[in-house]
Amino acid sequence: MANSSSVSEFLLLAFADTRELQLLHFGLFLGIYLAALLGNGLILTAVACDYRLHTPMYFFLLNLALLDLGCISTTLPKAMANVLWDTRAISYQGCAAQVFFLVFFIGAEFSLLTSMAYDRYVAICKPLHYGSLGRHKAFSTCLPHLAVVSMTVSSGLFGYLKPPSITSQSLDLVLSFLYSVVPPAVNPLIYSMRNQELKDAVRKLFLYMLLHHQD
């Protein structure tokens, strides 16, 4: 009879060797995850509840928030659970699901961010015909979109295409953190910080929740 074997689980790279650093990483991951949930959740609620934000640009932003939540929820909860329970194991099915959903969400987010950047460029340059000046403004408006796309794509490509001579566990962990955790956490800050309408909608949402809580 031919020998046969099957893989039932994989071992994830550990972020730290000592228990104290593991717990420190757990606290850091938990803070990042809660910030991502809060920021993207506020964007979803504000866009859905404020009729003034029912425009194509905010439709893109709403879908971006959904993709961010999906992307960060694919990897970070499992990483936090492993750190908390001091284990590195992940099942074969769980690993396959993580890879599938991570590739799906990152690919969809890349396409959406590119569409958002082009949408802002067209909205500013084409109707207004500002010349070299509708273009400087367009570049500054699209820059956050393009910066997030560039960081996600460059870190992902470098992580998987780098030469074996510079491979290390620490570098692999940093790169995976850059393309799977950082963008979903910072996207709400990037896109709300420069948008007065969205900030007004979030402020109204907070006031409504405060008044409702007092009643």
Image (tube, grey):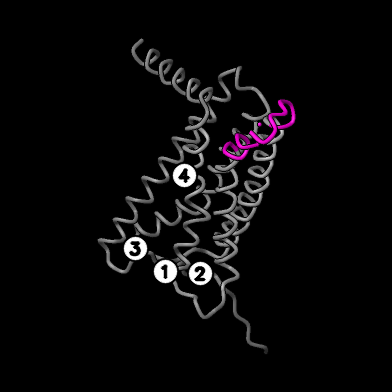
State which mark lies toward you, 1 or 2: 1
- The magenta span reads 125-141
Residue at 53% across, 22% down: 197
Do residues under tags 2 and 3 come within 8 Å of each other at their CB atoms? no
Give the mark, 2 or 3, whose residue is nearer the N terminus: 2
For mark 4, give the secondary structure.
helix
Judged from this view, the residue extending furthest toward the left is 20
Judged from this view, the residue extending furthest toward the front is 132
For mark 2, give the secondary structure.
strand
Give the mark, 1 or 4, whose residue is nearer the N terminus: 1
Residue at 53% across, 51% down: 74
Tell me which amino acid carries mark 2: Phe
The quadrant in which residue 93 appears is bottom right
For mark 1, give the secondary structure.
helix
Instruction: Say the numbered circle drawn on residue 86.
Output: 3
The residue that mark 2 highlights is 10
Instruction: Say the numbered circle drawn on residue 185.
Output: 4
Tell me which amino acid carries mark 4: Ala
Give the mark, 1 or 3, whose residue is nearer the N terminus: 3
Tell me which amino acid carries mark 3: Asp
The relative height of residue 79 versus residue 207 in the rendered view (above or below) is: below
Q: Quadrant of the N terminus?
A: bottom right
- The residue closer to the viewer here, 186 or 98, is 186
For mark 3, give the secondary structure.
loop
The residue carrying pointer 3 sits among few (fewer than 14), some (14 to 19) or many (20 or more) residues within 10 Å by Cα, namely: some
- The residue closer to the viewer here, 14 or 154, is 154
Give the mark, 4 or 2, whose residue is nearer the N terminus: 2
